[in-house]
Image (cartoon, helix red, strand yellow):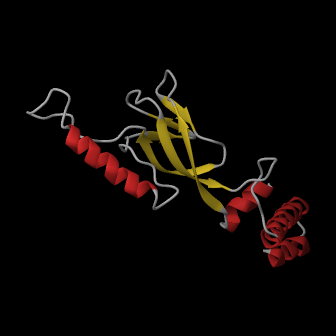
Amino acid sequence: MGLMGWELIGNKNTKLYQFRACPDSNNSIKLPCNASSVESVTTSYEDWKRITNYSENGDQRTSFIENHIEAEKIYRSPYYISGKLIPYELVDDTLYFTRNYGTLNILYKGILVDEEGLPMLSNKEAMAIATYIAYYLKYKEGLKTNNTGIINLANNLE
C-alpha cells in the first residue's frame, strides 16, 4: 500500500546509471530492478563505414577520425557512451534485440534505492505516504461500517 502511495505522490529521486551486458540466447537483457526508463543502448564498437573502393578492409582513415571524435566526446560527459545506437524492444523489464550484437552499453534512468531495495524518501514524502495510507484505511472502514463521520474524516485527510 505504501508503494501505491509513493506512485501517486509523483516525486521520485532518479539518477543515470550505465552498465554493460551481453544478450542471452533469446537476444534479451533483463534490466536492473531500479530501472525506470532506458536512455540508450549502444554497441561496444564504433559506427564507421567499412565499404570503400580503395581497400578490402574499409577506409581506415575514417576509422581513425571516428575514434578521435569519440575520444573527444568521452571527456565531456561521464555518461556519454560511444558506439552505434541499437534498436530494441522493451517488454516489462527486459530488452529484446533482433540479433546478438555482442557486449552492449546500456544507459538508463533508475530510482535511488536504499540497502534493502526500497525507494529513498525524504521526511516530507514519508509523511505524504503515511497520510495516504491513513486516508485509504479510514475511507475503507467508513464504507464497511456505512459511517459518514469516518468517511468525512477520511476526506479531510485527502
- Frontmost residue, 27 versus 3: 27
Is 141 left, or right, of 34 in this rendering? right
Where is residue 45 drawn, in percent x and y? 38, 37
- Frontmost residue, 101 versus 59: 59
Residue at point 28% right, 44% down?
Answer: 64
- Frontmost residue, 47 versus 72: 72
Is 154 left, or right, of 35 in this rendering? right
For the N terminus, the image quarter is: bottom right
Location of residue 127 (image quadrant): bottom right
Q: Is residue 154 above or below residue 1?
A: below
Q: Is residue 29 above or below residue 72?
A: above
Residue at point 77% right, 47% down?
Answer: 117
Q: How many marks?
A: 0
Where is residue 30 drawn, in percent x and y? 58, 35
Query: Which residue lies most toward the top here?
Result: 25
- Frontmost residue, 56 versus 107: 56
Where is residue 52 drawn, in percent x and y? 12, 35
Where is residue 147 drawn, in percent x and y? 90, 69
For the C terminus, the image quarter is: bottom right
Location of residue 111 (image quadrant): bottom right
Query: Which residue lies most toward the bottom here?
Result: 156
